[in-house]
Structures are given as structure tokens and as C-alpha cells.
Amino acid sequence: MKKALIIGINDYPSSPLGGCVNDANTLATVLESNGDGSPNFGVRKITCPSTDITRPVLREAIEQLFTGDCDMALLYFSGHGYIKSTGGYLVTTDAKKYDEGVSMDDILALANQSQARNKVIIFDCCHSGAMGSPSLSGNGTAQLAEGMSVLTASRDSEYALEVNGAGVFTSLLIDALKGGAADIRGNITPGSLYAYVDEALGAWDQRPIFKTNVTSFSPLRVISPKVPFETLRKITQYFPTAGSEHKLDPSYEDTEASANPENVKIFKDLQKYQSVGLVVPVNAEFMYFAAINSTSCRLSALGYQYWRLVNERRL
């Protein structure tokens, strides 16, 4: 069982925002199901102006999220963030001086105490990198319990931007969850989300922050694999050892007069491998020329990793 609390606040009395509710709505829709339509997260969504998200309202909702046992508890917040000498805060609609909202340190403490096997915290707000920051925690260490991952839109010293009515960070996050961050098996994890967003944002843009304490990532969402599992599991047939090459010749290419139907079928599988970086042609730029010139193909470094998974019956 997986549950998610999605928060979006537009209506701040003195400094309203424009894209937070849209971001929350879109993210909630994506998280509710996997790529094949199967159920994914049980989502609770709270947005303002529909609900007046005061400090007590937000605090209670977060406490409820991290109460009880589940496979994964995910917290997403889009709104204003604030930072001062005592740490970072998620700003609520009733914020005032010396009581800006819910403390990020308090949220971290609640998540650390949770019985959920995986805890994922995602903030799209200014200064969000203060979440779990060693420089602000007072003891020089960031205390992330086992199973915790934190992904934020910016460093603790940076602003998080909106463009065309949507958060820059969340727009990339949604693209990643729709498949941009999927591995060959179709799994999208907190680590792959960060890698996708990190690559998309340039050196002069806001910089996302990722902190984690996990031994193995669990998927946030699953889409159709880039290579069908049935095809992927044949990799050890085509490459009996990790260092072997699969010899090719014109009979593998279906446009050639010497085309062999069985070899053509194998070649289509090898081309699928090549399209996702598992296989590279030897002494040729493309697989077609490797076949026409009777060279071969071999596993890439990534291909070796998947070959090993199949060989060890882990896939």
C-alpha cells in the first residue's frame, strides 16, 4: 500500500502564487495510477483556495500521512518556503512573523519516526533545500532515517521559479514521472527523478537537491518497459558470456536476398537492445552496417548490468 499527501497553496494573503494548485492537481493525477492504468498511490490532495491551509491544518495532515504502516508515504508541497536561522519552513496561509508555518525540521522528525518502509518528501518552494540540511540542523549532520528520500526544487539559498503558471521543478517532475525518468524495465524511482531534473536544469538555473538513506530504491511509478521482459531475458541466449560478441552477417538483415527469417527475428531483438543502450555494433556506426559487413555486436556497460540480472535470475 502506498499513500501520498499532495499540497498546493496559491492564495497567500500578501503574496499569492499562480501555479501551485495546478501543479498539485497534475501531480496527483499522475501518481494515482501506473502507466498501464493499475492503481498506484492512494492520494489525498489539499489545495488552497479550496481549503484554508493554516498551520494546524497542514501539520495535522502531515502527521496523518506518517501515521501507520505502509509501503510508501509521499509528501509533496508546492507553495511558499521560508528560511531563517532556526531552519526552513513551509509557509501556510496564516503565516505571521515568528510563526511562518510548519517547520521542515518537525516534518523530518515525523517522517523519521514513521513506520512506513519508504518515506519520500518532495518540496517545490523557495529555500526548500533547507530540508534536512546539515548546516541548519544544529549538530552538523542531516538525520535521515532508513528508507528516507528528500528531493527539493532548489538549494536552501535559492528561489524556486514559476513559468507560464507552473513550477519549473514540478513541470520537470511530471515529465519524469510520465516516463522520462524510467529505466529499461519501466521503473521510476526517487533517484531517477533527481537524475532527470538535475540534467534538465542548467548550471545557472535553480539547482535541485537530493538526499537519501536507502539500501534499494522502490519505484514511485511503473510504466511499460522500454524492452519487453520476454525479449530482455533472451540477452543471455544471444550473449552466452558477458564478454562474448554476437556474430552478424547479411542474413540478419531482412532487406537482403540472403535474409534468414530466424536471424532476422534475432536481429530485431538486438536492435531493440541497441536502441536503449544495451548493445553496440563492433567496427560499425550502425547495426545495419555491422550485419552487411559481417562484423558483430557486443554488450555495453549498461548491457552487462542487465545481462547479469538475467543470468542471476533477478529479472
Image (tube, grey):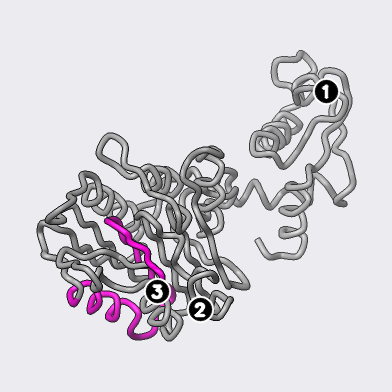
Q: Residue at x 25, y 62 (%)?
A: 7
Residue 275 on image: x %, y % = 65, 34
- Give the camera-side residue of 55 and 99: 99
Tag 3: amino acid: Thr
Q: Residue at x 72, y 58 (%)?
A: 310
Residue 158 on image: x %, y % = 43, 51
- 3D distance between C-alphas at marks 2 and 3: 9 Å
- 3D distance between C-alphas at marks 1 and 3: 60 Å
Q: Residue at x 45, y 59 (%)?
A: 156
Q: Which mark is residue 86?
A: 3
Q: Earlier in the sequence, mark 1 or mark 3?
A: 3
Tag 1: amino acid: Ala
Left or right, residue 164 beside residue 147: left
Q: Secondary structure at mark 3?
A: loop
Residue 110 on image: x %, y % = 38, 82
User: Which numbered disc, 1 or 3, marks the residue closer to the eye?
Assistant: 3
Q: Secondary structure at mark 1?
A: loop
Are discs 1 and 3 less than 8 Å apart at CB? Answer: no
Tag 2: amino acid: Gly
